[in-house]
Amino acid sequence: MSANAPASTGSTSKECTVKKMLVLGAGTAGTMVVNKMRRILDPEEWKITVVDQEETHYYQPGFLFIPFGIYGKRDVIRSRREYIAPGVELVMAGIDMIQPDENKVRLGNGQVLSYDLLVIATGCRIDASETEGLMESGWRKDIFDFYTPEGSLALARKLRTWEGGRLVVNVAEMPIKCPVAPLEFLFLADHYFHQRGIRDKVELVYATPLDGAFTKPKASALLGDILERKDIKVVTEFALGMVDPDRKVIATWDEREENYDLLVSVPVNKGADLIERSGMGNELNFIPTDKHTLLAKDHDNIFVVGDATDLPSSKAGSVAHFQVDVLQENILRWIDGLGLEPHFDGHANCFIESGFGKGILIDFNYDTEPLPGKFPLPGAGPFSLLEETKMNHWGKMMFRWVYWNMLLPGAELPLEAQMSMAGKRS
């Protein structure tokens, strides 16, 4: 069957059978998909169902701010049901397995849902058990994560009474959700410890598997300069092999070591376990996906969006937003039996909180690295690209309102899905 044509549903033009779009995951990407498509598709022709097992929707970018007392738990949680559009069926259940050859999904409660079109938006999660020693005696005592609400809240309690020492932020392995978040954590930690009057008692270290501060050279150079200016040590090409919580040491596979008094870990990120059970993912449970059309490479009636993909783009909310803009057009083309448009270019747009009321904005895609300039209006901004400014800080802080009130409901934002060179200087 052609990848550009919809799977046969057994219906004809004379039949009135309602077709079924099934979306797995009601996080950022899945919620945007169902809200946008419900407005577009005729409910007499298409039933839209979304499945998720969590009643709570988390604003994940907010986890970064909880350890420093900037946000509390109430700032990052809402009812998931509140953000699903009327006319969309929300099924609260775990997902056991996808059966793509049968166009069915088996839920944890034994229920089986059939589909004509499947959208997988099951995201990714940290798996600290992947690293030897990480979850042993030091876990949530002097080893913490901030990629979960539980981890960020526990770290907030720890930092309130911590009197100093060697704080190491370590990324176990790439890819991770929001690749700049570990850097933001260090920038905010520098600010926080200055405010507490103990910065001179704290050594900040960033141990990363990358060969620099970031994946893109120009941004890496700028961010590396800021780290140096803030007296934050960077240990590059640190491929984590194990953690020794008794000696308070992290070590690479080739036995390089870094000691810590407080370890802030970004554990291995993996796709959902159900992807492994379904035999659809790579070694980290990410689904092979066409990088431009978002169609699953091995299935002609399955699209993949958000963090569940194996795309070489950032796993971040802005990327999911740009993907969904491309996806909605390709879903309509798929329904009409037309060729899919290869329009997703890996576009990512990210505010980076740098502390002391300033931030940085980067805008890039698969082929173009971050460049200086103004955004979104050429010459006018109001945001400056690849530059540390107060306005960029406010852009970061305003995003929470945009997320709850515009992004999740699927409102049209004045941003093109494809990256524009307008306002950029090469």
Image (cartoon, helix red, strand yellow):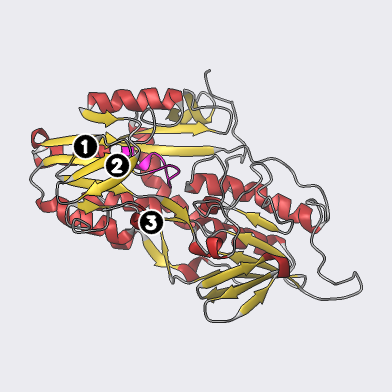
Camera-side residue of 13 and 422: 13
Label 2 SS: strand
Comparing 86 with 313, the one in front is 313
Please name the residue that numbered disc 3 is placed on.
127
Label 1 sits on what residue type? Glu
Q: Name the residue under label 1.
A: 258
Q: What element carries label 3?
A: loop
Does residue 221 show up? yes
The main secondary structure of the magenta stretch is: loop
Dot 3 alpha-carbon crowd within 10 angstroms: few under 14, some 14 to 19, many 20 or more = some
Q: Position of residue 18 (x, y in %)?
A: 77, 74
For the point 42% across and 27% down, the residue is: 219
Q: What residue type is labelled 3?
A: Asp
Whole-number angstrom distance, CA of label 3 to CA of label 1: 21 Å
Residue 363 location in percent, x, y? 50, 33
* Mark found first going from the N terminus, 3 or 1: 3
Q: Which residue is drawn at 72% across and 55% down?
A: 331
Horizontal side of residue 250 vs 91, given as left or right: left
Residue range (magenta)? 173-183
